[in-house]
Amino acid sequence: MSCGDPHDTECGEVLDHLYEFLDNEMAEGDCAKLRVHFEECSPCLEKYGLEQAIKALIKRSCGCDDTPADLRGKVLARIDSIRAGQRSGDSQPVAEVSAEENAGHGARSTLAASE
């Protein structure tokens, strides 16, 4: 997506890092660049607002459920594995949690595990 206007930070880059921004997982300097972009670009600001509202709705609807310890452990192990692969320059594709591994846990637990 692009609004067509020139920006210091391109719309695509902003949207690629939108969830990192929403989850406060970015360095302050990068956050500042995105804030400036949102002030200049109403389509990206609208997308940010929509994603922020969806995230709040999910948290409100699913935030009370406990994540099963085995699922949480698998998700955290997978995240560590991905991070280790990125540090070493490994370009191996990321495997997803299989339906069998996630059976019975539902989307609510998967979302809670990611918080």
Image (cartoon, grey):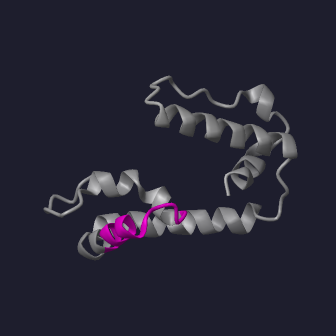
Residue at the spot 43% in from the left edge and 30% down from the top edge: 89
**Is residue 97 highlighted in magenta?**
no
Name the residue at the front extreme. 88
Residue at the spot 28% in from the left edge and 69% down from the top edge: 37
Position of residue 96 in the picture relative to residue 102 (left or right)? left
Name the residue at the top extreme. 92
Residue at the spot 78% in from the left edge and 35% down from the top edge: 102
Name the residue at the bottom extreme. 39
Q: Main secondary structure of the magenta part?
A: helix
Q: Which residues are magenta?
A: 23-35
Q: Quadrant of residue 82?
A: top right
Q: Which residue occupies the foreground of this view, 8 or 86? A: 86
Q: In the image, residue 6 lies at what x, y percent?
A: 13, 62
Q: Quadrant of residue 81?
A: top right
Q: Which residue occupies the foreground of this view, 46 or 21? A: 21
Quadrant assignment for the C terminus: bottom right
Q: Which residue occupies the foreground of this view, 73 or 43? A: 73
Residue at the spot 36% in from the left edge and 64% down from the top edge: 30
Position of residue 57 in the picture relative to residue 51 (left or right)? right
Q: How many marks?
A: 0
Position of residue 27 in the picture relative to residue 74 (left or right)? left
Tell me if residue 14 comes above or below residue 34 in the rendering: above
Q: In the image, residue 113 lies at what x, y percent?
A: 73, 51
Position of residue 105 in the picture relative to residue 28 (left or right)? right
Q: In the image, residue 77 lies at what x, y percent?
A: 70, 38
Q: In the image, residue 9 lies at what x, y percent?
A: 24, 60
**Is residue 34 highlighted in magenta?**
yes
Name the residue at the left extreme. 6
Tell me if residue 37 comes above or below residue 94 in the rendering: below
